[in-house]
Image (cartoon, helix red, strand yellow):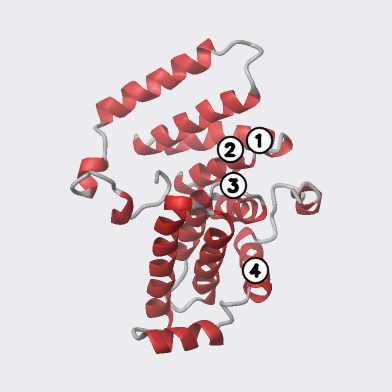
Amino acid sequence: MKYLESETFLGDNECSEDAIPSSKLLQIRLDEKDEQLAALPADASLESRLTLILERGYLQLDLDQNEAAWKAVQEMLPQAIDNELWLQAVEACDILYQAEQADSLKALAQGIWLSVTFPILPELSVAMLQHLIDETPDNSDGAAVAAATAAYIVDLRAEGAERKELKFFTSQLLGEVARRHSQVEEQEIFDFWVERMELDDPGKFLPRLAKVLDLVTESDWWFDRDALRAKIPH
């Protein structure tokens, strides 16, 4: 689990500090990515090139090189979208959000729309929605809608051991949102809260998520959503 920020997914590390590499090691890894990019042959696939740029971007974030990460990744985002590289496009939006620049929240909303619309890795979709939850006030219905969407995506896309882990994670996430939103502690009250908030019906909470994303972007979308919807696999 490389996208989600939770002690649940730290693996064999004893604590979160153990999971943080030293700056020196991060710089070595960044230099290696630069070398790999420079060595790419002219006929290398776009996916290979963009993947390296994104790997560099995450390393730059860890090194607090946020502006550099933003610039490099923002330039490649349209290429990823134009070539239907949805995973790379969402990773780009994730980096742009974490870079904490003026339009980072807009980048998050773009990435959430792509990650819900297209069947990318469910863990990344959940991570993007978790970012939105972290950005919303405790009493915001938007956080509840985002948590319900995360659980729905896991039900649709996740399989095997990943499904078990992500179902646990999203159930905990929804429970935490319920506590924040309405001080819900007991299961019976939680079930009532879910029903009252219409979080058990994707036909109702997905359109609400769309409205939340419109508000976050201030309707400043960086791509033609209608054109992209036509590319949705059936």
Which of label 2 and label 3 is nearer to you?
3
| Amino acid at circle 3 | Ile
The residue identified by callout 2 is 88
Residue depth check, mark 4 versus mark 3: number of the one nearer the observer: 3
Q: Secondary structure at mark 3?
A: loop
User: CA separation, marks 3 and 1?
Assistant: 13 Å
Disc number for residue 120: 3
Distance of mark 1 from mark 2, alpha carbons? Answer: 6 Å
Q: Residue at x 68, y 73 (%)?
A: 203
- The picture places residue 101, in percent across and down from the top left corner, at 49, 47
Q: Mark 4 is on which residue type?
A: Leu
Residue with the mark numbered 4 = 206
Secondary structure, mark 2, is helix
Tell me, yes or no, whether the two marked residues, 1 and 2, touch with CB atoms within 8 Å: yes
Report whether residue 68 is seen: no
Q: Is residue 17 left or right of residue 182?
A: left
Residue situated in front as seen by the camera: 16 or 216: 16
